[in-house]
Image (tube, grey):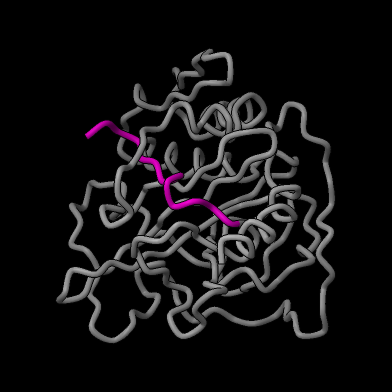
Amino acid sequence: MLTKSLSILLPFSILSCNNNATAPQKKSTVILSKNNSLNNENEFALINNIPLPFGYVRADNDTTSFAFWLANLPLKKDKTVYLYDSTPKLNQKAQFAVLDISVGTKNLQQCADAVMRLRAEYLFSQKRFNEISFTDNENTHYNFFEPYSKVHFMQYLQKVFGMCGTASLAKQLYKKNKLKDVIAGDVFIRGGFPGHAVIVVDIAININGNKIFLLAQSFMPAQNIHVLNNPKNENLSPWYEATEFDFLQTPEYIFRTTELMQWNKN
């Protein structure tokens, strides 16, 4: 089982995200099959409208929390994932739904960038401007500063996306000790050149205390942020079980479960 998992890991890692300041603007190499639909409609307006498996209820989050904000993100009706240049991503099988958030017109908002975008958007919505700060791989800090306008905010993010990536974000985040303690906003991240990152966007729990979670990602090239399907458990998909196992297989990448991280110290 371990050998199989590691053999799958290599091709996914080759396609994973680099620091955007040096990454070539590669096109996806996944072949679009006839079964991939570009026109399927999503019937759910928000992430927290995505149905739960029987016996599960969503976590009760404070209305000012990152978890609450993530769960209330809007989803597009169109389930197609588009690249930054408005062309459809070749692999249309990874996503369950697409977040209604801009991707931009440059090849910048890739994997870690999407995670930073969501965190920064949340802090901006809460007017916690002095907390919007990211570091590059040399530990240079990029702090948001006045004017606190949306236009300036988006300009600031373009700078962050160009200078920061998975390697730097992995250094900025804090280790999560146990998968069973996962909460919305936590990040599975492998820092490096290349690396990858996905963010937990919703959590549910059953009467036995078992957790399930939803994941979202962007990837390379820069593309719409999307909620991921679960390729290992189609009956549970798009939810993932927070059980103690060694690897987390997503549609386009395999993480070690020890690569779960959080924004704040305990």
Please, is residue 59 above or below residue 64 in the view?
A: below
Q: Nearer the viewer, residue 149 or 11?
A: 11
Query: Magenta span has 199?
Result: no
Q: Nearer the viewer, residue 21 or 15?
A: 15
Residue 191 visible from this viewpoint = yes
Relative to residue 249, is residue 235 drawn left or right? left
Q: Nearer the viewer, residue 123 or 215?
A: 215
Q: Which residues are magenta?
A: 254-266
Q: Nearer the viewer, residue 132 or 220?
A: 220
User: So how many labels did they put on this image?
Assistant: 0
User: Where's the C terminus, which quadrant?
Assistant: top left
Relative to residue 56, is residue 239 drawn left or right? right
Instruction: Please tell me which residue is depicted at 47% across the width and 29% down the height of the picture.
Output: 149
Coordinates of residue 186 in the picture (x, y in percent): 37, 47
Instruction: Please tell me which residue is depicted at 21% across the width and 52% down the height of the picture.
Output: 63
Coordinates of residue 265 in the picture (x, y in percent): 26, 31
Relative to residue 58, is residue 229 drawn left or right? right
Instruction: Please tell me which residue is depicted at 65% across the width and 61% down the height of the picture.
Output: 252
Please, is residue 200 above or below residue 266 in the view?
A: below
The answer to which image quadrant residue 1 occupies is bottom right
Coordinates of residue 194 in the picture (x, y in percent): 69, 38
Query: Magenta span has 261?
Result: yes
Coordinates of residue 258 in the picture (x, y in percent): 42, 46
Relative to residue 262, is residue 232 drawn left or right? right
Residue 221 visible from this viewpoint = no
The answer to which image quadrant residue 196 occupies is top right
